[in-house]
Image (cartoon, rainbow, N blue to C red):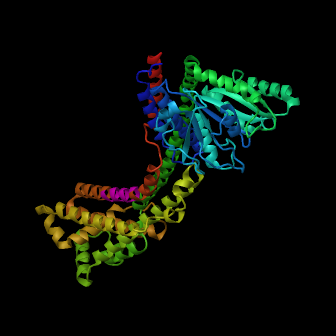
Amino acid sequence: MTTPTGLPDALQRLRDAVAAAPLGLATAGRDAAARTARAVVDQIDDYLLPRVRDLDAPLLTVVGGSTGAGKSTLVNSVLGARVTTPGVLRPTTRSPVLVCAAADVAWFSGTRVLPGLARTTGGGDTLSGITLVPTDALQPGLALVDAPDVDSVVEANRALAGQLLGAADLWIFVTTAARYADAVPWDLLRTAQDRGTALAVVLDRVPPEAVGEVAEDLAAMLRRAGLGAARLFVVEERPLVDGFLPAEQVAPLRNWLQALAADQEQRAAVVRQTLAGALESLGGRVDLVAAGVEEQAVAAEALRAAADAAYAGARAAVDEGVGNGSLLRGEVLARWQEFVGTGEWMRSLQGQVGRWRDRVTAAFRGRPDPAADLQGALESGVEQLLRAEADRAAEHTVVAWRSLPGGIAVIGGRETELDGASPDFGRKAADEVRDWQGFVLELVRAEGAGKRSQARLLSWGVNGVGATLMIAVFASTAGLSGAEVAIAGGTTAVGQRLLEAVFGDNAVRELATRARADLDARADRLLRGEQARFTELLADVAPPPDATAELRGALAGLATARGARA
């Protein structure tokens, strides 16, 4: 047989795409998709790539079955030689044994078949490799592998048995009259059917008086499972002869295997059946992996959307808190009243700007720096608003993630760390607010550089006018009530008229807009930095946008390569 052109490359691409399938989120289908992905990668590595690269290699026959089914004794008896050691204790934990003709050792001593398993040439009690046993009892062209129990209580045994079965050109499945209806063997037989693997079944240890009844029952079960084409061999329960099954009991199986070894066309037919079945099975299996990746993408998007909603809510709340006048109560309002000259301004609201200027100037002369006190109060108020909303957004995100698929595992026990603002948020917020105040003062300096405004600005001071502009940014009474409305309303009116006296109506509006936009940008930056704690956790496990497309593209490439082969 010749190697299909392009098929090895297409298989390699598919293998790499499946191996890289992002399944980091603990979604409902993640474990099944991960198991399927591992099985696909193992079969491509262990069987498909070696086989398509060398279609004329010896037929690899794996003898697998249930615990205590007599696999090793069967192999020894078929060959008439002790090439593998039957397990006395259960579970048996030993290396799988690969038996081949001396002339075929070169085919299996390297990494062409089962590349992940080291080769040894002696006995051992490890599952880290495969024991290679050359023998003259087996003709060239056929190799037998005595595999671990498929239903072993040792997980490593089961995993290795499954890997070996996935690497086989032919399965010889060994069961017993007492256990042939067990669930685990039938799960594996259905796997053989799904993958199109060539299959023979050995029904071992059958009481002579029940041979007909038991064999017919098993044959009927195979037919119902769509495995009617599988060869069925029956071995009666007979005393061993020097450790071997009676020759007449294993003769049908021995003759069939010898015929396979002697006939290249028969071997090629088995290889074609299993190879075609394995290739055909990849579509559905890779689709399952792709569905798992799509589930991951949906889960990741839900987690991302939850964080987006929580922090969008925080930004909206900060925006409302800045604009609704609530920052003008308490300490800020008290400092502003001190700044403009206690409560006298309420009785002089209709007075001239010159009188407000006198009050501001007197305030500067009467105390060290009332503008600085006002700015400090504003800084503290904005910081508290930012901190409260950062805490609330973090808490909402944690609560949402705990209820969404995959979210608990992403948080990974970090609820205490994540359900509030980050430890250095207060420092960052203080720095941003101080920098914003500096930005406002620079706006005032730049706008007051003209000859018309310069004199008034110098008269009232950059800090005083800057503090007044900051108040204008928060100038609303929507968040206030009762006496606060009257006080704050008059307060902001004073500030507005003072600013208009310095800069003019249009300039004041523009300055306030620019100051507010800069504060909004800083708040947005702070909150996005907080949200990044969550998005960075998600970035480590969420699939990239093209992950599913890569899998489906690799699968399409394989279909194209198979079509070219046909």
Whether residue 479 is visible: no
Name of the residue lying farthest toward the right: 209
Total marks shown come to: 0
* Coordinates of residue 467 in the picture (x, y in percent): 28, 69
Give the image location of residue 525, x and y in percent.
Answer: 35, 57
Q: Is residue 35 visible?
A: yes
Is residue 404 shown left or right of residue 512?
right
Q: Looking at this view, name the residue that lies furthest to the left.
A: 451
Q: Quadrant of residue 205?
A: top right
Is 113 or 461 nearer to us in this picture?
113
Question: Could you tell whether 223 is left or right of 141 in the image?
Answer: right
Residue 169: x and y in percent read 58, 28
Q: Residue at x 56, y 50 (%)?
A: 406
Q: Is residue 304 above or below residue 4?
A: below
Residue drawn at x 39%, y 68% as measured from the top left: 424
> Taking 5 as reference, is 226 left or right?
right
Pick the front one: 320 or 151:
151
- Looking at the image, which is closer to me, 518 or 17? 17
Question: Residue at horizontal 21%, vertical 64%?
Answer: 442
Q: What's drawn in magenta, residue-wise?
A: 518-528
Q: Is residue 335 above or below residue 84?
A: below
125 or 460, which is in the foreground?
A: 125
Q: Is residue 521 magenta?
A: yes
